[in-house]
Amino acid sequence: MSDGKPRSSRDVANPLSFTDRAAESVCYRCWKAGLLLRTVKPIYERNRKFAGRAGSRYNTRSYYLFVLGNGSDEADIGNLRFFSFSKTPKIVKPNKSQLILNFLRTNLDKAFYNSEIVKLLKNQGITIRDIAPNLRRYEKKGQIFFRGYRTAEHETPFAGGFIVTYLDSSKLRSEAIAEALQRTELLLEGGSHINPLAQRIRVIRDEILKAKELKEIVSLSFLKQKLHCNDDQIRTALDRAIQLYKGEIKEVGVFNFPYYYHTGLSDEDLRIAIEDKKDYIRRVKGKDNRIGHNWEACVEFFVDKLTKGAEFLEQAHRSRMDKRRITLKLLKPIGERKQFAEVDRVWTICPSPISNSQSFSLFLSHQ
């Protein structure tokens, strides 16, 4: 080092036949003793290494440069600034764990997704790897309310990540948890647009809350029409809503039709609402059913009386179904029917002895 040129520990190791670790240790001890000066910040260099048949590999190496001090505490060589150990400015790393906790404590009235905290504290050096371990540690200490989507056995993140908020230690534990849960609910409702399923869950809960105030129960068909979705989507959304709001949303069957209500309804109001729906089903569904059967009877009467050579086919059923209703096994699905379908009437017509018979079928929908 007597020539005054800046060198790295690796540059010193090669001519002295030292290992890289030994040369680095010697340079550090000399710098600490005041014999050498060292750059304030490390230098980053991209290296290329030939790996045989695997080709070339690249890595980034960081190192410091050392120069002989000659009794001075600092020196400027080129664009680099060198300091002695005693003059080197101490870089105090921020306590990231405390930064995260202080941020949540300062925003006590709000809840955040963990990914949102990273964006808000990015300027202070917080990365995504710093969030989860620190939050889980504070959760174990009872200082943080941590919430995800809960199933029977697991808790998974929402579309925006886990939700966290600070627990106010100045209040009773039950009161602090209730307030924290309310803050997470507000965040879920406000950010539901990022996930179609979350949006459907919010609409379902809103409609059930409305029905609670009106002392009513909500049908599956009403929710399906409200959300403009198919059967699979509405079923998935309802299952998730019941799981997410287990203590609020319940299902009840009315003549095998599913209805949903809020547990805030009193037993008497629920009984009255169910009786109202039963009366509605008797009047409307019964009317539709009678209209369909009347059409079948009309067509059957005119075909039987006015068509010569017409003969209706019959099929025995285990139930009380009309023998003239025919069940067909499908080779390919037709609409929502996958394996079987029913036709109301099938008849054959043979106008004369020498003509071929022709078959006709009748399908009438009761909807």
Image: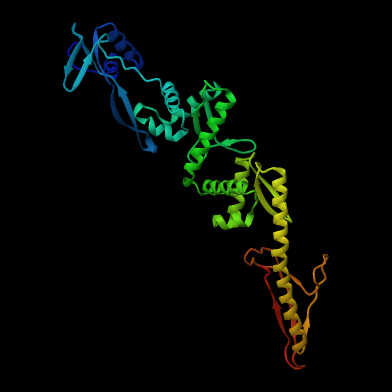
> What count of labels does the image hold?
0
Quadrant in the rendering for residue 150: top right
**Residue at the location (62% across, 66% down)?**
335
Instruction: Using residue 361 as the reference point, say whether residue 140 is left or right of it.
Output: left
The correct choice, above or below, for 281 with respect to 266 in the image is below
Of residue 2 and residue 217, the one placed in the foreground of this image is 217
**Residue at the location (73% across, 54% down)?**
275
Is any atom of residue 278 visible in this view?
Answer: yes
Is any atom of residue 343 visible in this view?
Answer: no
**Residue at the location (62% across, 51% down)?**
235
| Residue 188 image offset from top left, x and y in percent | 51, 40
| Image quadrant occupied by the C terminus | bottom right
| Residue 14 image offset from top left, x and y in percent | 28, 18
| Residue 284 image offset from top left, x and y in percent | 69, 64
Of residue 151 and residue 210, the one placed in the foreground of this image is 210
Of residue 20 and residue 351, the one placed in the foreground of this image is 351
The correct choice, above or below, for 302 with respect to 145 in the image is below
**What colouring method underlies this structural image?**
rainbow
Instruction: Using residue 190 as the reference point, say whether residue 275 is left or right of it.
Output: right
Instruction: Using residue 6 as the reference point, say whether residue 121 is left or right of it.
Output: right
| Image quadrant occupied by the N terminus | top left
| Residue 65 image offset from top left, x and y in percent | 25, 18
**Residue at the location (59% across, 45% down)?**
209
Of residue 217 and residue 40, the one placed in the foreground of this image is 217
